Amino acid sequence: MATPRPDATGAALQRRFLVTALPAWLAGSIALLVLSGWRSAAAFALTFLVVGGDFIWVTRSITALMKAERMTAGLMWRVLPGFTLRILLLLLLLYGILSAFPREFIGVVLGIGGPLVLLAVAGAIPNRG
């Protein structure tokens, strides 16, 4: 059995994630709009997009890193600041969402948890028996 190429695996994982995430994002936004109002739905939708976008960014970065022939110190000095910037940007965006919607904590929590659950599902799909 041949081992799949890293770029094919990363692209397939992204595709599986997006196929499950886009309907969940829409359904969650509509459900929170009906149940809790537009502010909760907006907090959920924005947080879901930020966390989902972060996953896509990380997957592409790791896929590019895996394509490198060898790991050198110069490559690591380019990769580490990128990952640090990603974490800072993610935290800044989440802080901004919580500042804009301070009472909509449940929307933010669901917006963070939703993509994480879907990521686990997307990763488990090829391994099911």
Image (cartoon, rainbow, N blue to C red):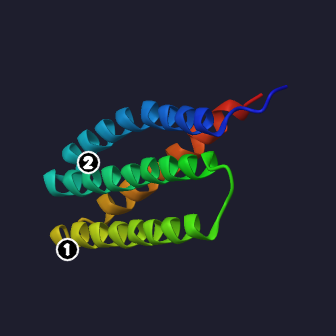
Looking at the rendered image, the quarter that the N terminus falls into is top right
* For residue 107, above or below residue 27: below
Q: CA distance from mark 2 to mark 1?
A: 19 Å
Identify which residue, 85 or 128, lies in the foreground: 85
Instruction: Please tell me which residue is depicted at 62% across the width and 36% down the height of the picture.
Output: 9
Residue 28 percent coordinates (x, y): 32, 43
Residue 126 percent coordinates (x, y): 68, 31
The image quadrant of residue 26 is: top left
Identify which residue, 100 or 41, lies in the foreground: 100
Q: Which mark is residue 115?
A: none
* SS at circle 1: helix
Residue 81 percent coordinates (x, y): 45, 72
Identify which residue, 125 or 88, lies in the foreground: 88
Which residue is denoted by mark 2 in the rendering? Answer: 32
Identify which residue, 90 or 117, lies in the foreground: 90
CA neighbours of label 1 inside 10 A, class few (<14), some (14 to 19), many (20+) = few
* For residue 117, above or below residue 92: above
* SS at circle 2: helix
For badge 2, the amino acid type reads Leu
Q: Which mark is residue 99?
A: 1
